[in-house]
Image (cartoon, coloured by chain):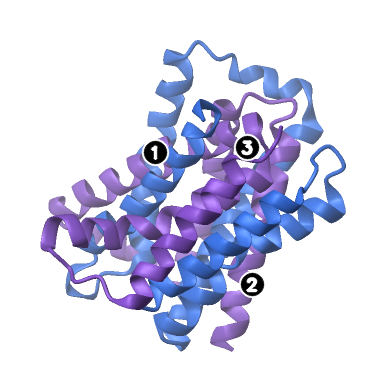
Chain colours: A blue, B purple
């Protein structure tokens, strides 16, 4: 079970973050400007974390392909977040959130097709499907 | 159009986990987070320049700077770092499935802190999420 702690930690952090963001979005403040403010200090702080953990981050330059994947991941993640804001401008959250909540199933499909190094088991598919349905019920309550 | 953007969000987030998995085979996940942040920042910066939201950063109050910085620490410095660590350790499929339970944080906080009434839909959603996580984490390795 200890192996899953980082995933639960991520769930907790990703769950807490929108609650904190809402506190800052007072007076119709732009969410995009909010993201910009959030990222700016996060970069030097992440650098400090890397240094504190004695991780040689320069090693990443030894494998340019892996680095490209990571840079692309950061880009795609943010593009997804921007799409979410655009969706929320055009549709109600009750429509948008259930659709975006399906992302684990899309991830599993993409992993099944493109990632030979990782097996997508029936347990994970079944569990993810239940989590997604549960999430949809929770966000549309 | 809003639904299309919501679908694109889900696709981008699904794709992101696949890219992180590919990248963290060779790069330390905490260092990978450090590299992914500027990539995302550039995206938001360009969009912010285009939409004019960048100028709104200067109009943010010290309170908003504090709140968005806190949100950035939670989401980008801690949340994303443990998400990447989890992907590197237990795989992208399992991580995205477990971390999708982040939708539970808000209702659980509302129940514990504000005594929100648990209706049938919310209860069913919570049960499904917990059952899904149980199935994922109990799978044979």
Near mark 3 (Cα within 10 A), the count class, few <14, some 14-19 or many ≥20, is many
The residue indicated by pointer 2 is B8
- Asked which secondary structure carries label 3, the reply is helix
Height in image: A118 above or below B88?
Answer: below
Q: In this view, does B68 lie to the left or right of B7?
A: left
Describe the element under mark 1 as helix, strand or loop: helix
Q: Which of marks 3 and 2 is nearer the N terminus?
A: 2
Q: Which of marks 1 and 3 is in front?
A: 3
Q: What is the spatial separation of the Cα atoms under label 2 and label 1, in whole angstroms?
A: 26 Å
The chain identifier of the residue carrying mark 2 reads B
**How many numbered marks, from 0 up?**
3
Pointer 1 and pointer 3: residues touching (CB < 8 Å)?
Answer: no
Q: Is mark 2 on a helix, strand or loop?
A: helix
Q: Position of residue B119 (x, y in %)?
A: 28, 76
Q: Which mark is residue A77?
A: none
Q: Which residue appears at 47% of the width and 66% of the height? A: A135
Question: Which sits in the foreground, A121 or A41?
Answer: A121
Give the residue at mark 1.
A42
* Residue at image coords 25%, 54%: A20
Q: Where B25 falls versus A20 (above or below)?
A: above
Q: How crowded is mark 2: few (under 14 residues within 10 Å), some or many (20 or more)?
A: many
Instruction: Report whether A124 appears left or right of B2.
Output: right
Q: Mark 3 points at which residue?
A: B87
Q: Is residue B54 something that shows in the picture?
A: no
Residue A14, image x and y in percent? 41, 50
Label 3 is found on which chain of the structure? B
């Amino acid at each position: 079970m200890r192996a899953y702690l980082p995933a639960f930690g991520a769930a907790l952090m990703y769950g807490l973050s929108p609650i904190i963001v809402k506190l800052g979005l007072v007076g119709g403040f732009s969410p995009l400007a909010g993201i910009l403010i959030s990222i700016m200090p996060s970069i030097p702080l992440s650098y400090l974390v890397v240094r504190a953990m004695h991780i040689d981050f320069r090693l990443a330059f030894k494998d340019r392909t892996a680095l490209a994947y990571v840079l692309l991941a950061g880009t795609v993640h943010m593009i997804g977040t921007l799409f979410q804001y655009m969706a929320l401008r055009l549709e109600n959250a009750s429509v948008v959130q259930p659709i975006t909540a399906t992302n684990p199933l899309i991830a599993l499909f993409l992993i099944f097709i493109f990632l030979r190094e990782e097996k997508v088991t029936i347990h994970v598919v079944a569990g993810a499907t239940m989590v997604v349905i549960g999430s949809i019920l929770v966000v549309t309550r | 159009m809003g639904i299309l953007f919501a679908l694109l969000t889900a696709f981008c987030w699904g794709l992101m986990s696949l890219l992180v998995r590919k990248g963290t085979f060779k790069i330390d996940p905490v260092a990978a987070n450090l590299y992914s942040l500027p990539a995302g920042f550039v995206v938001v910066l360009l969009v912010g320049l285009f939409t004019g939201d960048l100028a709104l950063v200067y109009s943010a109050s010290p309170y908003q700077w504090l709140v968005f910085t806190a949100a950035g620490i939670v989401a980008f410095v801690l949340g994303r770092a443990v998400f990447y660590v989890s992907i590197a350790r237990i795989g992208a499929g399992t991580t995205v499935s477990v971390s999708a339970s982040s939708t539970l944080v808000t209702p659980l906080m509302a129940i514990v802190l504000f005594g929100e009434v648990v209706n049938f839909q919310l209860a069913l959603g919570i049960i499904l999420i917990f059952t899904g996580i149980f199935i994922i984490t109990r799978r044979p390795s």
